[in-house]
Amino acid sequence: MLSYTEENYLKALLMLSFQNEERPEAGTNEMAAYLGVKPATATDMLKKLKEKELVTYQKYGKILLTELGREKATAILRKHRLWETFLYEKLDFSWDEVHEVAEQLEHIQSEKLVNKLEEFLDFPEFDPHGDPIPKANGDIPAIDKVLLSEVTAGEVCKVVAVKDTSAVFLQYLEKLNITIGTKFKVLEVIDFDGSLSIQIEKEEPRSVSMKFAESLFVKR
Amino acid sequence: MLSYTEENYLKALLMLSFQNEERPEAGTNEMAAYLGVKPATATDMLKKLKEKELVTYQKYGKILLTELGREKATAILRKHRLWETFLYEKLDFSWDEVHEVAEQLEHIQSEKLVNKLEEFLDFPEFDPHGDPIPKANGDIPAIDKVLLSEVTAGEVCKVVAVKDTSAVFLQYLEKLNITIGTKFKVLEVIDFDGSLSIQIEKEEPRSVSMKFAESLFVKR
DNA sequence: TACACAAGTTAGACAAGTCTAACAAATATT
DNA sequence: AATATTTGTTAGACTTGTCTAACTTGTGTA
Ligand SMILES: [Mn+2]
Ligand SMILES: [Mn+2]
Ligand SMILES: [Mn+2]
Ligand SMILES: [Mn+2]
């Protein structure tokens, strides 16, 4: 059985491994920063996780989830995203509110609960942010997505997920009338600062920053 | 902000206060037994709760929730019973399974969540065990109930709640086809051992023990 | 290659929650 | 009233998760 805290560390490592798929190892400082703790604290926990064979790592080396660790972490992520979906779909939470509460709910221990919840939600594939919900067996649905910053002028695309799930970004998207499923055309890309001009349906064209474009996943 | 553990102590004190309404104070050992910890542990926690003005008590004396303590405890109980209702109504949990999971869910911190959940469940008044669900303002719906052991021969009554919520008792009730709302007639009360003979609708009469009769609440 | 700086670890401390063993107070029994 | 029993507290220890401050290792740059 894993503690609340151990679970958070495992999920953090999984999330970090998604950040650059071809090099899924994390560093101590990186992990500590993600969790909002000091590096010394992360080092201590790492020893415990290694002891439990949930990660492989050696002093001053990189951290990698073991198969077992990845399974546990995936199960927590599954719960997180199912709860987010529940809050959004059934309890009318907005997509910038769901994360914080799911952060707590993901630690509830009950196999039956998570599976019944999934059934109750009609086996959703994606959470309110467009992120794939792992299946009970650990499989993660694939999505065909690319960062908006990689799209060139003239292309039409559809929003499929957000990379940044911070409340401030999500609220900005709401203000722009952009949500999962929104379609728009990229009119122009400004080389100078990476900003781009987009046009949603029949609306007025508007300009968004490079930071914006690097925070949104779309499908061409 | 209260810790998970502090919340459990407060709820325990509230539950104990319900056990004999006219004398709502609890003792250290009683409380420790209820929570499954040692008396020494309970004493330590008591000092902390007193420090936070959630209980009144002095060395070797009885423990009583303060107004503030009662409010906090009631809020936790409210969450517990709403979650039980959710699990039972929406996720097809049986009434002997809900308690354990609700024990975890009751600690989720989100005002919005509990209120939205209540709305989603259509403002239920009672949980799957027939216990009243406190309102957001702290009010607790009243129920007209009496222990089955206080019913005399010849009376007809309806099950309104269970006093004992252990899985073993609840499963026994299921086996007997008794649930909240079941009506039956008390045919005979045996003075010798307090057992009684009851008849549900058109079923065969059956005998139940005094322990059984002291675990079930009915309405005459 | 040397050195500076970034990355990571260790030592020692602390708070929360728990325990055991020993003790003290209150209550019940004779 | 004296004593026995129950009830509750204290002291000291342990675990988990966290920190700060000091130290060590690894790496990139000159
Ligand atoms: Mn979490
Ligand atoms: Mn999400
Ligand atoms: Mn609890
Ligand atoms: Mn209940």
Image (cartoon, coloured by chain):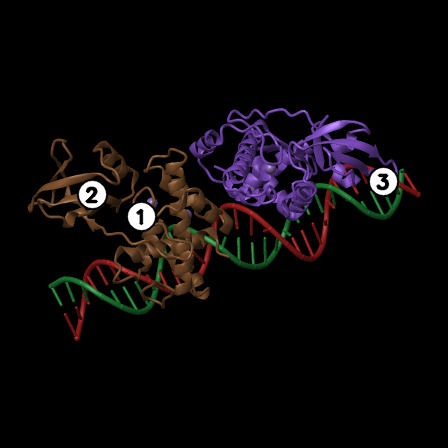
Chain colours: A purple, B brown, C green, D red
Q: Please provide percent x and percent y for residue D30.
A: 93, 43
- Three-letter residue code for mark 3: Asp
- Three-letter residue code for mark 2: Lys
Question: For mark 1, does the 10 Å Cα neighbourhood hold few (<14), some (14 to 19), or many (20 or more) residues?
Answer: some
The residue nearer to you, when weighing B41 against A125, is: A125
Q: Please provide percent x and percent y for residue D6.
A: 24, 58
Mark 3 lies within 8 Å of ligand 2 (Cβ measured): no
Mark 3, residue position? A193
Decide which of tag 2 and tag 1 comes sooner along the chain: 1
**Label 2: chain letter:** B
Mark 1 lies within 8 Å of ligand 4 (Cβ measured): yes
| Residue at (38, 42) in percent of width and height | B84
| Residue at (32, 53) in percent of width and height | B141
The residue nearer to you, when weighing C25 against A1, is: A1
Mark 2, residue position? B158
Q: Please provide percent x and percent y for residue A61.
A: 70, 35
| Callout 3 secondary element | loop
- Marks 1 and 3: in contact by CB < 8 Å? no
**Label 3: chain letter:** A
Q: For residue B102, which numbered disc appears in the image?
A: none
Residues tagged by mark 2 and mark 3 found on one chain of the structure = no
Mark 1, residue position? B131
| Callout 1 secondary element | loop
